[in-house]
Image: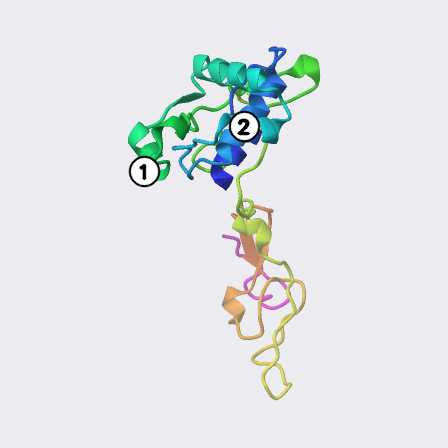
């Protein structure tokens, strides 16, 4: 039994849905997949076995096999492989290879309320028609601008012994206790492109803007 071949029949085999015998073709193809290798090759169950699997008549199974071959969903396998397993030629069933490389076309059946996904791109993103993205790319979102990520008026850190390190900040500017007075600034815009010395920590320099 090949899980890969069975999965192909159940999910991807391009059996036309508008055929009246679509269900019969599916169950017969599923019976073949039950005997195929992981690559869909060398399935040679007897017709009587397929009749038992599908609950169809022998004539219906034979018809389904011919239809599947016409649809290029199965093709004759190497007869020497079958001969290696079944020695008596009069009891040797016909072997089949399944076209597991073929898949049902991705079609937007919006009239039926069914949305088929397009193939995923190299980032694993699946898209809908007209370029509309159906799923977002995995990973973290873009980080905000660093200037907006920077806390304003952050609390001053304390020394390990609990005492403040350096000159305490006034709480009005964006500075640490360990920052020199000359480096204590008040930002004048959100983009942090214009600043002025803190008038509380450095009153002597507060009239100098940069």
Q: Check if residue 209 falls in the magenta segment.
A: yes
Residue 153, placed above or below residue 55: below
Viewer-closest of 207 and 96: 96
**Residue linked to disc 2:** 48
**Residue linked to disc 1:** 84
In the image, is 186 to the left or to the right of 65? Answer: right
In the image, is 132 to the left or to the right of 69? Answer: right
SS of the residue under disc 2: helix
Q: Which labelled disc corresponds to residue 10?
A: none
Residue 176, horizontal then vertical, whole percent = 57, 70
Residue for point 70% across, 19% down: 113
Which residues are the magenta region? 198-210
Residue 141, horizontal then vertical, whole percent = 56, 45
Residue for point 61% across, 79% down: 158
Residue 85, horizontal then vertical, whole percent = 36, 38
Give me the C-alpha separation between circle 1 and circle 2.
Answer: 20 Å
SS of the residue under disc 1: helix
- Please indicate, yes or no, whether residue 90 appears anywhere in the rendered image: yes
Q: Where, by quadrant of the figure, is residue 135 drawn?
A: top right
Residue 1, placed above or below residue 97: below
Q: Where, by quadrant of the figure, is residue 117 drawn?
A: top right
- Please indicate, yes or no, whether residue 127 appears anywhere in the rendered image: no
Residue 112, horizontal then vertical, whole percent = 69, 15
Q: Where, by quadrant of the figure, is residue 205 drawn?
A: bottom right
Viewer-closest of 177 and 28: 28
Query: Circle 1: is it few (<14), some (14-19), or many (20+) Cα within 10 Å?
Result: few
* Rendering colour mode: rainbow
């Amino acid at each position: 039994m090949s899980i890969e071949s069975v999965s192909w029949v159940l999910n991807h085999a391009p059996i036309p849905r508008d055929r009246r015998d679509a269900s019969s073709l599916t169950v017969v193809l599923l019976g073949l997949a039950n005997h195929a290798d992981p690559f869909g090759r060398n399935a040679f169950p007897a017709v009587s076995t397929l009749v038992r699997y599908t609950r169809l008549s022998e004539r219906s199974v034979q018809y389904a096999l011919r239809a599947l071959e016409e649809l290029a969903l199965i093709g004759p396998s190497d007869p020497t492989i079958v001969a290696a397993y079944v020695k008596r030629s009069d009891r040797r069933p016909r072997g089949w290879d399944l076209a597991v490389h073929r898949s049902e076309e991705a079609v937007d059946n919006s009239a039926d309320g069914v949305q088929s996904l397009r193939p995923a791109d190299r980032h694993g993103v699946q898209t809908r028609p007209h370029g509309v993205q159906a799923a977002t790319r995995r990973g973290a979102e873009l980080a905000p601008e660093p200037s907006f990520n920077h806390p304003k008026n952050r609390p001053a850190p304390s020394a390990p012994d609990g005492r403040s390190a350096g000159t305490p900040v006034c709480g009005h500017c964006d500075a640490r206790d360990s920052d020199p007075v000359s480096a204590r600034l008040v930002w004048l815009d959100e983009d942090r492109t214009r600043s002025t010395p803190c008038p509380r920590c450095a009153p002597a320099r507060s009239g100098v803007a940069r």
